[in-house]
Image (cartoon, coloured by chain):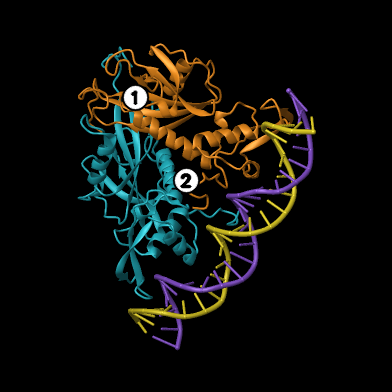
Chain colours: A orange, B cyan, C yellow, D purple
Amino acid sequence: MDGYDKYAYEPFAVTADLAVFTLRAGALHVLLVERGEEPYAGRWALPGGFVRPDESAESAARRELGEETGLTDVSGLHLEQLRTYSEPGRDPRMRVVSVAFAALLPDAPEAHGGSDAARARWTPYDAARQLAFDHDRILADARGRVGAKLEYTGLATAFCPPEFTLGELQQVYETVWGAELDRPNFRRKVLATPGFVEAVPGAARLTGGRGKPAALYRAGTAAALHPPLLRPTPEGPPA
Amino acid sequence: MDGYDKYAYEPFAVTADLAVFTLRAGALHVLLVERGEEPYAGRWALPGGFVRPDESAESAARRELGEETGLTDVSGLHLEQLRTYSEPGRDPRMRVVSVAFAALLPDAPEAHGGSDAARARWTPYDAARQLAFDHDRILADARGRVGAKLEYTGLATAFCPPEFTLGELQQVYETVWGAELDRPNFRRKVLATPGFVEAVPGAARLTGGRGKPAALYRAGTAAALHPPLLRPTPEGPPA
DNA sequence: TCAAAAGTGTTAGCGTTACACCCATGC
DNA sequence: GCATGGGTGTAACGCTAACACTTTTGA
């Protein structure tokens, strides 16, 4: 690392790119922006931008998240670093290294497009194809990571508002995994996992207009779930 | 991302840093190099180096791995991207963004120090402290990731030679996890997991000089383990 | 009174743990 | 023979999946 002349090489640019997920109408959606300029003008892309000299990639990602979603307070939102994409040629203009992040939003405010983006739109995950650069791959990696992390962390609560019902939490799992879960068993598993959720005493909320009001819960403090909440296997639950 | 002048800012440098693990004498060891120059002259650090303009971070990591270990063929070794460290000020000289990788070696050739490093040494993990830069943290993150990945991937075979016994594989788990496993149960779990290992027909090897020769196995093709091989919980196996 | 949604109880089956036991080899 | 390490068998336990059932609300 010594004897390196920092101006000797073509400089690297570093960007933070975001896969911002939310649930809308029972489907996983991702925030996309339309590119206004070449390359890939008119194509959809993941929101993102350059890391500035005085900030970390995490700071840049959080700043972009606020700009693109229009949310005024993004300080409490979950931001997860995925991995870094550094293949030469992934941006035809210059050498760009992208640190990719995933973010999870409980509700979906209408996207309004930040300063960089012509338009921003929530798109169903399955319809988000043919993105600019290598963003198809980044998005697929992000989706895979989020699905896997639901198994062994309390991440699912990041898709929920501050107070939520167990039915809402279950819908998060069912939507992201694309599988139906048994309600009684889901309930027991969640409550049996220390630190996953904590009850809001006395609070209840009607969900579907009818039916018994559901008790409310808040996200717990546990980072990892013991035991994990395993995803049902595609063919036959026991494997 | 548009309208960016690539020479307007202080340039970023991108490095690939490596946490290279191996097992020696029943203990987890990590490869460290001694820094020859300021900052942190004389301190130990993780091997690593700058990503060159025509290579990805993965390529740079593999190149460094070969240089630091002296191995002639590192093409088959497992290299895993951990995360990227980008806090301003983590290198006092300039803005350096480091993409960190973990690598696993079956045997431990004596380190001889690459071109950049004054000395290189295999160090027991527990003795690797007070490293240069933020390498203490990177090393701790790497160790955590490797331990966790043993649970749900076939990664443990990366610590073993091409053909290995189940006893050797079990020692990998016991060493990394710092826990004793039941041999009969370990054997059954591994063999019951499709794609984890495949038998080498007819082959056998004496391990401790005495005892029944053990059958040999090769790493299987499965990336993920179903079911996972869960780490025993610290207090009481069932939890 | 009915439909809808929350919540409780119960049982059969499976996987895991713990441990006893047998096999093959070198000394 | 005996120590050492590989390999097999098995019974008790715990967890989970599946599903029947009760409770509380709005219409």
| Place of residue B229 in the rendered image (x, y in percent of width and height, measured from the top left) | 47, 54
At a point 23% along the width and 41% down the height, the residue shown is B63
Q: Quadrant of residue B198?
A: bottom left
- Kind of residue at badge 2: Pro
Q: CA distance from mark 2 to mark 1?
A: 28 Å
Q: Sequence order check: which comes first, mark 2 or mark 1?
A: 1
Name the residue at 21% across, 23% down: A10
SS for callout 1 = loop
Q: Nearer the viewer, residue A183 or B88?
A: A183
- Label 2 Cα crowd, 10 Å radius (few <14 / some 14-19 / many 20+): few
The residue type indicated by label 1 comes to Leu
Chain letter, disc 2 residue: A
Whether residue B92 appears in this view of the structure is no
> For residue C2, which quarter of the picture?
top right
| Nearest to viewer (mark 2 / mark 1) | 2
Q: Which residue is mark 1?
A: A131
The dot on residue A234 is 2
Residue B134 image offset from top left, x and y in percent: 40, 35
Against A197, residue D3 (above or below) is: below
- Residue A48 seen in render: yes
Query: Mark 1, chain letter?
Result: A
Image quadrant for the N terminus of chain B?
A: top left
Relative to the observer, which residue lies in front, A62 or A166? A166
- In the image, residue D22 above or below residue B211: above
Task: From this view, report whether residue A217 is shown above or below residue C23.
Answer: above
Element type at marker 2?
Answer: loop
Left or right placement of residue A200 versus residue A40 in this view: right
The total number of labels drawn is 2
Query: Residue B218, how many percent across, how many down?
Result: 32, 60
Is residue A175 toward the left or the right of residue B218 in the image?
right
- Location of residue B166 by image quarter: bottom left
